[in-house]
Image (cartoon, rainbow, N blue to C red):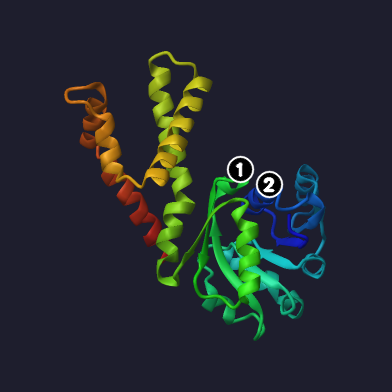
Amino acid sequence: MTGSHIGFIGFGNMAQAMAEGMIRGGALNPDQIYACARDWDKLQDNARRYGVHGCKTAGEVAEKSDIVIVAVKPYLVEEALTPVLEILKRKVVVSVAVNVPFEKYEEFLLPGTHHLSTLPNTPVAVGEGIILCEKRHSLTREEFEQVKGLFSSMGMVEVVDGEHLGIAGAVSGCGPAFAAMFVEALSDGAVFYGLPRELSYKLASQMVVGTGKLQLVTGRHPGVMKDGVCSPGGTTIAGVAAMERNGFRAAVIDAVDAVMKKQKG
């Protein structure tokens, strides 16, 4: 467990997922976490839920924290940080705001501020997340290792160059929504044939977890894994053929394409 104090400027869904993941993973005690948000009443409720400190201002969060995590909407980043720029120059600043890379922060943070842009996903809450770290940053080696160690309690940490941060984020950040849709659809099919809803969700979700783990551990090509389940003339290949006829692969590729086009405006 680290002795550092962590502060969240913004305490929405992603910040809460990260706080939960760090607490659940044993990296931090709730007492080491500070947070502020625009809606004070809502912040108090969320702070009580996780046992963290609710603060009224970004300045209070920054002063009490060693590592400040910027977790506001991308268009609010500069506005939220402007009042605390002098304080942030003495801190480690980590951004989780989408599409706000290192070079963008360099435009308004004070010269010499140590900062890193990252993209976590929601499964960090249960220690099975992905945290993408932009390769270009201004942290010292010791600071980066500290952040990496802290984030490792929430899942996989991957360093990605700025050029590929957007597409990597599309896979890891938007992917949970796509995977959840697949789990829901597979469950609907099971319910259609009489399986209770709760059990169908449980089986479908664990199947996704197990299949992903199998690929990570073995390094097998997903196509080989698919073929390994498809017996000639069997039930699985019949289902695969139905998915192919209905454009499953194309729909997923188009979804990624739509995300990237939205990112680029």
Mark 2 → mark 1, Cα distance in angstroms: 8 Å
Residue 233: x and y, percent? Answer: 17, 23
- Image point (60%, 50%), residue name: 154
Quadrant into which the N terminus falls: bottom right
Q: Secondary structure at mark 2?
A: helix
Q: Is residue 76 shown to the viewer in this render?
A: no
Q: Secondary structure at mark 1?
A: helix
Residue 70: x and y, percent? Answer: 65, 65
Q: Which mark is residue 20?
A: 2
Q: Mark 2 touching mark 1, by CB under 8 A? A: yes
Label 1 amino acid?
Val
Horizontal side of 150 relative to 247 (left or right) equals: right
- Viewer-proximal residue among 133 and 53: 133
Q: Earlier in the sequence, mark 2 or mark 1?
A: 2
- Image point (65%, 58%), residue name: 150
- Viewer-proximal residue among 41 and 230: 230
- Residue at the outermost bottom position: 111
Quadrant into which the C terminus falls: bottom left
Q: What residue is pinned by disc 1?
A: 126
Dot 1: within a 10 Å radius of its alpha carbon, few (fewer than 14), some, or many (20 or more) residues?
Answer: some
